[in-house]
């Protein structure tokens, strides 16, 4: 295979607003990340991905950018970022940033000029359409609820388009001048010494230019916009151009957010002719909800999850590279989502999940707090939620006939705020995150789950992540766990079992996804036990007996 440097990385995602507050204003910042680099180095990661720190009115916590080349003062300064890049490099830690180019903030200079003057060239940097029969141009529902169209002030029948919030107008990628301005901005960032980008909502940049109404699918009489502005044919043309104008000029790493991409279309994203180094595959991550709506929870089985996970690995393996993950800033905590028996939430559940995903083929991503086994919170009213999408989902749940208590419970299970609570550094006021009340409520269990309690504890989730990373990065199994092929193995419906093979070495990962003991027949002898989240292993005749949520990594 054609080996690339970024296949060797272990990436740690930082939500800067909630990582560490160095100046005690209640908001995490860039210098706070710099101060915690030694913690990350000790964990063993090799790269950090920082969520948006650009200038922004913070309607969507930084994913609404008003200036791509300036830093939001809450996070610090350009000098702070330069220092972070320098200090990270001293520790052999690279840095990638978020690239948000489907939309800008409505406070961006381009959009302000577009509103101000109908003859401005910036009017064509966005998508403006005339309404029809007193209604918006189409009946599409935005990702955050409500129409995708917002009336333009002081113009009788004109609307602008937004896939997400009304304060996030979509850029018009059909305009070559606008695209060139974005490419120039991307290249300026890469010149500063960052290692690359995680690219946000990139499969939304192509819209169905017919702008047809969709089938009504909710009590709001609207139609989901997904069929008209996500994964639309022609997307690959923009991808090809962007790659040639930017990424190909640098030896950088890019990872695309690619929700809802069918595997026959993956070649546009990754592989020899794809735009990006790797992709996040969401085809198995939203197994617990229908159509990404938090108020439509689904009963799922381990068998279904396993089938989706294995399909993801086998399909992506055919032509490119993946970025396995369990959590991110848009997902709830994985332990609550995937470990149904709460009795195993403290150690065995989190470590089994970690083993299950970390040795998949691809570059693994760890989200802040995941290495501590952080859990979801418990809120009692909508006022306690910050996320714009949480408020939109709450409103939609009420419109669909659910009671307030039910709507809150949906959010407690699935809100994006679950992963955005301040990082618990120690059992102190505000968890050592800040000496000031944080911008968002703490997770109430930080007294028990915090970094200080785990860093020196060899039986902690943190220590287990350290071991996993060391095995992948520095052991005799490095080549197999990084470059080896992925092959699913047959097992009980509630056991996830696969092997990685490279040269003459075979490593098998076995994970019991159940609160019951399970057995698996061993067809080959075990040469070595590489990793075990229990103290012992048990055999009966030719069968390996697995404890509840036990995980094993073995060499055959």
Image (cartoon, grey):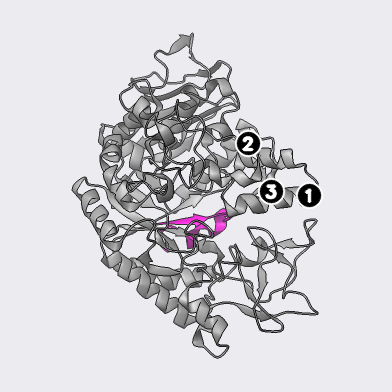
Q: Earlier in the sequence, mark 2 or mark 3?
A: 2
Q: Give the secondary structure at mark 2.
A: helix
Secondary structure under tag 1 reads loop
Q: CA distance from mark 3 to mark 1?
A: 10 Å
Q: Which numbered dot is residue 304? A: 2
Q: Earlier in the sequence, mark 2 or mark 1?
A: 2
Say which mark, if any, is on residue 400: 1
Closer to the observer: label 3 or label 1? 3
In the picture shown, does residue 81 fall above or below 410?
A: below
Separation of marks 2 and 1 at Cα, in angstroms: 27 Å
Magenta span has 5? no
**Residue picked out by circle 3:** 394
Quick one: which residue is furthest to the top in this view?
541
Distance of mark 2 from mark 3, alpha carbons? 28 Å
Given residues 109 and 479, the one toward you in this image is: 109
Residue 372, position as x, y percentages in the image: 42, 31
The span picked out in magenta is 255-273
Q: Mark 2 vs mark 1: give the one in front.
A: 1
The residue lying at 50 percent from left, 29 percent from top is: 445
Q: Which of the two discs, 3 and 1, labels the residue nearer the N terminus?
A: 3
Which circle, 2 or 3, is nearer the viewer? 3
Instruction: Please tell me the numbered disc located at residue 216.
Output: none
């Amino acid at each position: 295979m054609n080996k690339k440097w970024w296949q060797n990385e272990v990436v740690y995602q930082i939500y800067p607003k909630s990582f560490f507050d160095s100046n005690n204003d209640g908001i995490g910042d860039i210098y706070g990340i710099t101060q915690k680099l030694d913690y990350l180095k000790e964990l063993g990661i090799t790269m950090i991905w920082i969520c948006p720190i650009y200038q922004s009115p913070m309607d969507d916590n930084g994913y609404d950018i008003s200036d791509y080349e300036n830093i939001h003062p809450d996070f610090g300064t350009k000098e702070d970022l330069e220092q972070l890049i320098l200090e990270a490099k001293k520790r052999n830690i690279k840095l990638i940033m978020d690239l948000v180019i489907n939309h800008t903030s409505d406070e961006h200079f381009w959009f302000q000029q577009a509103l101000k003057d109908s003859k401005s060239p910036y009017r064509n940097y966005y998508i403006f359409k005339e309404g029809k029969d007193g209604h918006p141009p189409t009946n599409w529902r935005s990702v955050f609820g409500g129409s995708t169209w917002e009336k333009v002030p002081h113009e009788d029948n004109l609307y602008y388009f937004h896939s997400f919030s009304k304060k996030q107008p979509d850029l018009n990628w059909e305009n070559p001048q606008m695209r060139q301005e974005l490419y120039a901005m991307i290249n300026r960032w890469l010149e500063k010494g960052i290692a690359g980008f995680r690219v946000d909502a990139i499969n939304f940049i192509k819209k169905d230019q017919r702008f047809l109404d969709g089938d009504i699918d909710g009590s709001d009489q609207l139609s989901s916009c997904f069929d008209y502005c996500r994964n639309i044919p022609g997307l690959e043309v923009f991808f090809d151009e962007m790659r040639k104008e930017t990424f190909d000029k640098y030896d950088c790493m890019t990872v695309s957010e690619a929700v809802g991409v069918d595997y026959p279309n993956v070649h546009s994203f990754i592989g020899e002719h794809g735009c990006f180094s790797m992709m996040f595959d969401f085809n198995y991550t939203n197994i617990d909800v229908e159509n990404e709506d938090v108020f439509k929870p689904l009963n799922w089985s381990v068998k279904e999850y396993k089938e989706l996970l294995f399909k993801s690995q086998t399909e992506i393996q055919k032509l490119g590279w993946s970025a396995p993950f369990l959590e991110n800033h848009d997902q709830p905590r994985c332990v609550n989502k995937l470990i149904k028996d709460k009795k195993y939430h403290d150690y065995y559940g989190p470590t089994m999940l970690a083993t299950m995903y970390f040795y998949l083929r691809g570059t693994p991503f760890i989200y802040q707090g995941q290495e501590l086994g952080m859990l979801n919170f418990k809120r009692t009213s909508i006022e306690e939620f910050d996320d714009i999408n949480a408020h939109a989902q709450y409103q939609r749940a009420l419109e669909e006939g659910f009671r307030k208590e039910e709507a809150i419970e949906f959010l407690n299970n699935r809100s994006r705020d679950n992963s955005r609570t301040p990082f618990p550094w120690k059992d102190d006021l505000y968890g050592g995150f800040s000496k000031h009340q944080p911008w968002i409520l703490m997770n109430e269990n930080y007294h028990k789950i915090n970094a200080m309690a785990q860093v020196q504890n060899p039986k902690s989730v943190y220590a287990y992540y350290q071991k996993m990373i060391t095995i992948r990065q520095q052991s005799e199994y490095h080549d197999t766990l990084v470059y080896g092929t992925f092959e699913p193995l047959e097992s009980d419906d509630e056991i996830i079992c696969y092997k990685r093979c490279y040269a003459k070495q075979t490593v098998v990962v076995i994970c019991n996804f159940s609160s019951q003991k399970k057995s698996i027949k061993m067809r080959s002898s075990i040469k070595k036990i590489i990793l075990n989240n229990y103290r012992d292993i048990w055999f009966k005749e030719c069968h390996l007996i697995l404890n509840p949520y036990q995980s094993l990594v073995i060499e055959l």
